[in-house]
Amino acid sequence: MKIGLFIPCYIDAFYPQAGIATLELLEKLGLDVEYPLDQTCCGQPMGNSGCNSDAAAAEALFVRNFARFDKIVMPSGSCTHHVRDNFDAIPQTDEVRHVRENTYELVEFLHDIMKVEEFPWAEFNHTVGLHNSCGTLRALRTASMSELGEKPFSKPMDLLSKVKGIRFVTPKRPDECCGFGGTFSITEEAVSARMGLDKVRDHYQAGADYIVSADSSCMMHQQGCAERAGIPIRFIHIAQILNGARA
């Protein structure tokens, strides 16, 4: 497979280590990966804000960059959700349909497509709480939803359980939104901040040293809430752990 790597805006700007870990991890698994250098935003912020037509230029550029790849992989559930389910500001050509049908969030790609059974280089001797973003949980279905009463499953937990030394704790409300919600955190700042603080406290009281997630945007929000409240908990993207980060 020829893999096109997409790195979301907020990872590029604030958490480049998560993007680097994603590239290194895919290459460790023997994949042929290319990073198109003129990539920009996928258009998600405009689409989420109801300004769908304003996303057209970003979506068109995304297709020009990635239509030639067999699979497009990105360390972001929300961006994957936008491309796969809401990428409709441009005409739906064969190239656009190919891109939409072959775009994967990192966890689901490793779990469902690559079916990775081991990460022999990975060891993380810390206690972690897993945060599933709303996009990965309810749009991509990488884990079960408690409100459906379905049989529990978790693709990120399946992958993390293959890492040596890692220990898990579960917050009391594991499915609860952290309050980021993209532009929601701007338009409803007070509600968003309180939701983030509640989420961080829930993980910390459960005994987590780290909160791990497949979405840096949620972690960025929670990290700000934790720092302002003086809660000594750390944050790390799942790609970093699977790639072999020790802390």
Image (cartoon, rainbow, N blue to C red):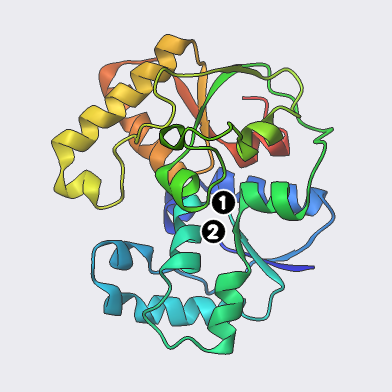
Q: Quadrant of residue 159?
A: top right
Could you tell me which secondary element the residue under label 1 belongs to?
loop
Q: Residue at x 28, y 24 (%)?
A: 197
Q: Residue at x 81, y 33 (%)?
A: 121
Q: Quadrant of the N terminus?
A: bottom right
The residue lying toward the viewer, choosing from 218 and 20, is 218
The residue lying toward the viewer, choosing from 131 and 146, is 146
**Residue 188 at x, y = what percent?**
15, 43
Provide the residue designation for mark 1: 75
The residue lying toward the viewer, choosing from 176 and 7, is 176
Could you tell me which secondary element the residue under label 2 belongs to?
loop
Instruction: Count up the numbered dots.
Output: 2
Provide the residue designation for mark 2: 7
**Residue 243 at x, y = what percent?**
71, 39
Residue 41: tell me if it is visible: no
Q: Residue at x 41, y 76 (%)?
A: 58
- Asked whether disc 2 touches disc 1, contact meaning CB atoms under 8 Å apart, the reply is yes
First in sequence: mark 2 vs mark 1: 2
Q: Look at the picture and state if 172 lies above or below 161.
A: above
**Residue 223 at x, y = what percent?**
37, 30
Q: On the rendered structure, is 32 left or right of 212?
A: right
Q: Which residue occupies the extreme front position in the image?
A: 149
The 10 Å Cα crowd at callout 2, few under 14, some 14 to 19, many 20 or more, is many
Q: On the rendered structure, is 104 left or right of 56?
A: right
- Tag 1: residue type? Pro
